Every structure is written in structure tokens, then in C-alpha cells.
């Protein structure tokens, strides 16, 4: 999954780089390019 800086969407890194760096060089937070949708069956399993 790719992550981008909230200050500069052109600055993209891998999950590993985002975790190791913490903040982007422009001091922006890393945010995922896309957030996968959870299936209803998965959510039901969380309630058990």
C-alpha cells in the first residue's frame, strides 16, 4: 500500500518508509492512497 504526505500528494512512499520516517520531509503526515472497504461479514466477526 502506498502513502502520501498530506502537505504534498506527489510525495509517495511505501508502508515501511512511512512507519520508519514517521513524518514526511515536508513535515506532513502520511496518509494511505486508498482505504480498503471492509466486508459486512468481516464486521460481523468483530462483534463476536
Image: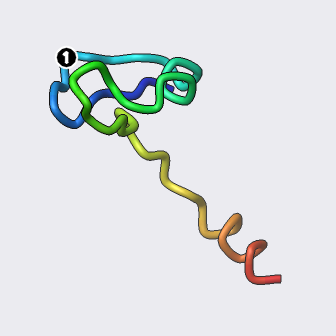
The residue carrying pointer 1 sits among few (fewer than 14), some (14 to 19) or many (20 or more) residues within 10 Å by Cα, namely few
Screen quadrant of the C terminus:
bottom right
Q: Nearer the viewer, residue 14 or 37?
A: 14
Q: Position of residue 37 (x, y in %)?
A: 49, 53
Q: Position of residue 22 (x, y in %)?
A: 46, 32
Q: Is residue 12 left or right of residue 21?
A: left
Q: Is residue 18 left or right of residue 47?
A: left
Residue shown at the point (38%, 31%) measured from the top left: 23
For the residue labelled by badge 1, is the local secondary structure a helix, a strand or a loop?
A: strand
Residue shown at the point (21%, 23%) measured from the top left: 26
Q: Position of residue 25 (x, y in %)?
A: 29, 19
Q: Which residue is mark 1?
A: 10
Residue lying farthest to the right in this orientation: 48
* Above or below, comparing residue 39 to residue 19 in the picture: below
Q: Is residue 40 left or right of residue 7?
A: right
Q: How is the image coloured?
A: rainbow
* Above or below, comparing residue 8 to residue 48 in the picture: above
Q: How many marks?
A: 1
* Above or below, comparing residue 34 to residue 43 in the picture: above
Q: Position of residue 42 (x, y in %)?
A: 70, 64
Residue lying farthest to the bottom in this orientation: 48
Residue shown at the point (33%, 25%) measured from the top left: 24
Q: Is residue 41 left or right of residue 1?
A: right
Residue shown at the point (61%, 69%) measured from the top left: 40
Q: Nearer the viewer, residue 38 or 27?
A: 27
Q: Nearer the viewer, residue 18 or 35?
A: 18
Amino acid at each position: 500500500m502506498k502513502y502520501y504526505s498530506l502537505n504534498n500528494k506527489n510525495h509517495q512512499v511505501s508502508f515501511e518508509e512511512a512507519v520508519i520516517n514517521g513524518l514526511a520531509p515536508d513535515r506532513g503526515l502520511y496518509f494511505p492512497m486508498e482505504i480498503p472497504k471492509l466486508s459486512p461479514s468481516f464486521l460481523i466477526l468483530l462483534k463476536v
